[in-house]
Amino acid sequence: MTTPHQDECPDALLPGTRRALLHRIAVGQAEGRAPSLVAAVVRDGRTVWQGARAGLPGTDRGERIQYRIGSLTKTFTAVLVLRLRDEGRLDLADPLERHLPGTGVGEATVGELLAHAGGLAAESPAPWWERTPGSLRPGLDDVLGERPLLHPAGRRFHYSNPGYTVLGALVERLRSAPWEEVLRREVLEPLGLDRTSAQPLAPHADGWAVHPWADVLLPEPVQDLGLMAPAGQLWSTTEDLARFAVFLVHGDDRVLSEATVREMRTPATPVEAADVADGTSYGLGMQIQRQGGRLLVGHSGSLPGFLANLSIDVDGGLAAVVLANCTSGPPLSTLGADLVRIVAEAEPRVPAPWRPLPEVDSSVLELAGPWYWGTHPFALRLTADGTVSLGPLTGGGRRSRFRPNGDGTWTGLEGYYAGELLKAVRRPDGTVDHLDLGSFVFTRQPYEEGASVPGGVDPDGWRGIG
């Protein structure tokens, strides 16, 4: 898949939108005091805008210049693990010990490690791993330390860099090859990410620390993270990460299916009260947050000298990439969300035209319309993608889409009814008596007389009381 330059794209943004985006990154670079900051926006699978701001000579080189992306590397590592799952080499419910014995954290499952719910410590033992050579931690014991588990596995979200080191070791064990080699062969090359690498490739930005109280700089060291590489080693560009964003929405059958990348974007970890209040969660190698009424997925990253953010609004068909070469300063998560918001508000997505279904099964069509769960009115609708939807006629409540199973039943796809079976229960003459949804009975009239309502219906029917 190619990503056209803004000037070549037939869906390029309007001049006012482009200026608003440039203004936003200019403010971010100036107020955050970043030596340089580069960004890109993707709309409906195309890169439609790229921008750069720099305060140092020779650093404003745009979409092809590499920046270190820190923990955004974890999303790439998660893709490798899920490829193994999809091939049947492992299950997310497998304890790590089954595939990588002797770590001391083997009770955690593969899925829990992907979701930072394995109970592992956040960091490896001293010295600070991000600013020291990986050669100081030659074995997993050196990464995990004497007390690798701080919490019971599966009980809470606790972000863990060593957890992704373990996942990288798992990939190496099952592929019999180094993590970097597996990543290049199975993800980077198929997706055309030729400017994403474990080691920096020219041209690349230099990493800087900016003094908190003076406008002066200090070079940050560039370390090979060794075994910690699967947690934060990678370098990339706005161009490559824009392509990666498209993949994380639509999938690519050479790497992962659309269903699997959707699974990555689905919350997979227990959240605490503060997380609920903040609207944040974590999937399988992907952060999930609600900002400004939009659900954004992706990941942030930081290493000494660098900041990175990838924010994707799947429903809105938008994504933003922001990279900077400073240890701290501009809040890139907020900046990425703002770039998405600017485009969404300035140029609202034009919906596809409504079209009738090409054909319809009459036995399904007769189920469309109002149904009652007790006295609560619901509506069943046929949708253009071949699913059916069932939800309250008004207000909030339990709702879901259901995919057909090919035998006259449907399976719920989301929410309370995810995985639950919906079926039409018919009378001996073939007419529909009721809908059964996981034992819940839906009738055409509230507590319909003669229908198979659990507990029966009072024979005297509805009445008033004088």
Image (cartoon, rainbow, N blue to C red):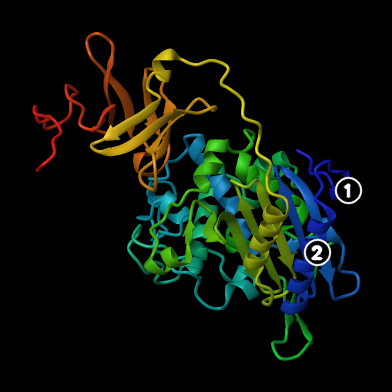
Say whether residue 381 is left or right of residue 234. left
- What residue is drawn where x is 43% and y is 46%? 99
Residue 421 falls in which quadrant of the image? top left
The label shown at residue 22 is: 2
Where disc 2 sits, the SS reads helix
Toward the viewer: 21 or 280? 21
Task: Please state which of residues 153 and 308 is positioned toward the viewer in this rendering.
Answer: 308
> Which amino acid type corresponds to the residue marked 2 in the rendered image?
Leu
Q: Quadrant of residue 106?
A: bottom left
Q: Position of residue 12 (x, y in %)?
A: 82, 47
Q: Foreground: 368 or 125?
A: 368
**At 29% from the left edge and 26% from the top edge, which residue is drawn?**
444
Residue type for callout 1: Asp
Residue 1, x across and y down, in percent: 75, 38
Question: Which residue corresponds to the image point at 43% horizontal and 13% vertical from the top-left?
Answer: 362
From this viewpoint, is residue 446 visible? yes
Q: CA distance from mark 1 to mark 2?
A: 15 Å
The quarter in which the C terminus is drawn is top left
Q: Which mark is residue 382?
A: none
How many numbered badges does the structure rendering display?
Answer: 2
Residue at the far top in the pictured view: 429
In the figure, is residue 155 to the left or right of 263?
A: left
Residue carrying label 1:
7
Mark 1 residue element = helix
Up-down: is 438 above or below 5? Answer: above
The answer to whether residue 308 is left or right of residue 375 is: right
Q: Is residue 225 visible?
A: no
Q: Sequence-wise, which precedes: disc 1 or disc 2?
A: 1
Residue extending farthest to the bottom is 213
